[in-house]
């Protein structure tokens, strides 16, 4: 008789950053622009950065830290990630407003050091060029800000009931509302057309400028895939609507990517709709 036993083993997933081999093209670790305001608290003036790592075992060690451009390790400012449905998740949410207040404008590097399943290594999560929020510094940018509250399969990570949030700012355009009005009429006994309901099912278009893979991954593989609440702000001089600031939206059509010949960058186009469908009129029967 064979002696058999069953043993459950955890799948080892080592963290991945945005570092890549040098081939002579643009690198993904070019600084990402982030903005914050020293005194004003509006969300769309103050970017955040959510960093999260999934460990393989509770004994694994993960350290998330920030460095200045000279390599000095700085105190983290923000809040620790809370993941009540996933005991192996560890994260930190950087508040750039607090970084600006403490250290000022400049270039900052977020690093992750880890020992997972006996493997010790480090990675660069990203490089960030922190500037003070102003109309001039925000000009031409779009910001996506998201909260996460569902299961993220690529990392086998459960964001349910977590405080995880992240924002990504890039050059592009968001707006050009199309009302796509849904019209329901009926004909009364006098053969007159009478309105029953009218509803604007608004859509908005997101167009990015050419962006590197570090930004496109954050948009396509994280924000547009995993967000549970999403808010978009536009800062373009020629936008028809200057009040697109933390607008609550939902992705309505798959994003399209256009790759640029002999250039590592790509552009993204995506269609969004209002998260709340309340742009409607109808007869109120009492």
Image: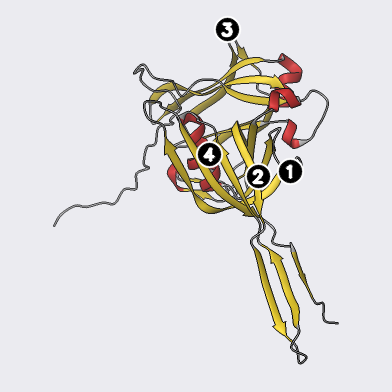
Question: Mark 1: which secondary structure?
Answer: loop
- Per the model, the C-alpha gap separating discs 4 and 3 is 29 Å
- Per the model, the C-alpha gap separating discs 2 and 3 is 39 Å
**How many neighbours does mark 3 have within 10 angstroms: few (below 14), some (14-19), or many (20 or more)?**
few
Which residue is located at x 71 percent, y 46 percent?
Answer: 247
Name the N-terminal-most of marks 1 and 3. Answer: 3
Q: Which mark is residue 219?
A: 4
Vertical order, 214 against 105 (above or below) = below
- Per the model, the C-alpha gap separating discs 4 and 1 is 23 Å
Vertical order, 29 against 240 (above or below) = above
**How many neighbours does mark 4 have within 10 angstroms: few (below 14), some (14-19), or many (20 or more)?**
many
Question: Mark 4: which secondary structure?
Answer: helix
Q: Position of residue 212 (x, y in %)?
A: 47, 28
State yes or no: discs 2 and 1 in contact (Cβ < 8 Å).
yes
Name the N-terminal-most of marks 4 and 3. Answer: 3
- Per the model, the C-alpha gap separating discs 2 and 1 is 7 Å
Which image quadrant is residue 110 in? top right
Question: Mark 2: which secondary structure?
Answer: strand
Q: Nearer the viewer, mark 2 or mark 3?
A: 2
The residue labelled by disc 2 is 175
- Per the model, the C-alpha gap separating discs 1 and 3 is 41 Å
The residue labelled by disc 1 is 241
Q: Residue furthest bottom?
A: 189
State yes or no: discs 4 and 3 in contact (Cβ < 8 Å).
no
Of the pair 224 and 245, the residue shown nearer to us: 245
Tally of numbered tags: 4
The residue labelled by disc 3 is 70
């Amino acid at each position: 008789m064979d002696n058999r036993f069953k043993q459950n083993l955890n799948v080892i997933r080592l963290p991945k950053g945005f570092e890549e081999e040098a081939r002579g093209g643009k690198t993904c670790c070019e600084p990402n622009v982030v903005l914050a305001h020293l005194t004003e608290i509006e969300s769309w003036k103050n970017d955040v950065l959510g960093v999260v790592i999934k460990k393989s075992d509770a004994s694994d060690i993960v350290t998330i830290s920030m460095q200045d451009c000279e390599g000095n390790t700085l105190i983290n400012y923000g809040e620790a990630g809370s993941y009540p449905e996933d005991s192996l998740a560890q994260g930190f949410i950087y508040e750039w407003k607090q970084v600006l207040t403490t250290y000022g404008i400049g270039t900052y590097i977020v690093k992750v050091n880890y020992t997972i399943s006996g493997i010790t290594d480090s990675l660069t999560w990203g490089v960030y060029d922190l500037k003070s929020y102003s109309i001039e510094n925000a000009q031409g940018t779009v910001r996506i800000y998201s909260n996460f509250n569902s299961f993220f399969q690529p990392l086998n990570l459960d964001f349910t009931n977590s405080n995880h949030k992240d924002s990504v700012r890039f050059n592009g355009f968001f707006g050009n509302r199309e009302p796509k009005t849904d019209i329901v009429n009926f004909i009364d006994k006098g053969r007159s057309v009478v309105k029953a309901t009218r509803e604007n099912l608004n859509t908005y278009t997101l167009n990015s400028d050419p962006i590197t893979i570090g930004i496109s991954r954050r948009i396509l593989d994280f924000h547009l895939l995993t967000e549970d609440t999403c808010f978009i702000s536009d800062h373009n001089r020629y936008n028809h609507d200057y009040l697109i600031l933390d607008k609550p939206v939902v992705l309505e059509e798959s994003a399209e990517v256009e790759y640029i010949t002999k250039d590592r960058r790509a552009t993204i186009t995506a269609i969004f709709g209002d998260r709340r469908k309340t742009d409607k009129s109808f007869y109120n029967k009492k």
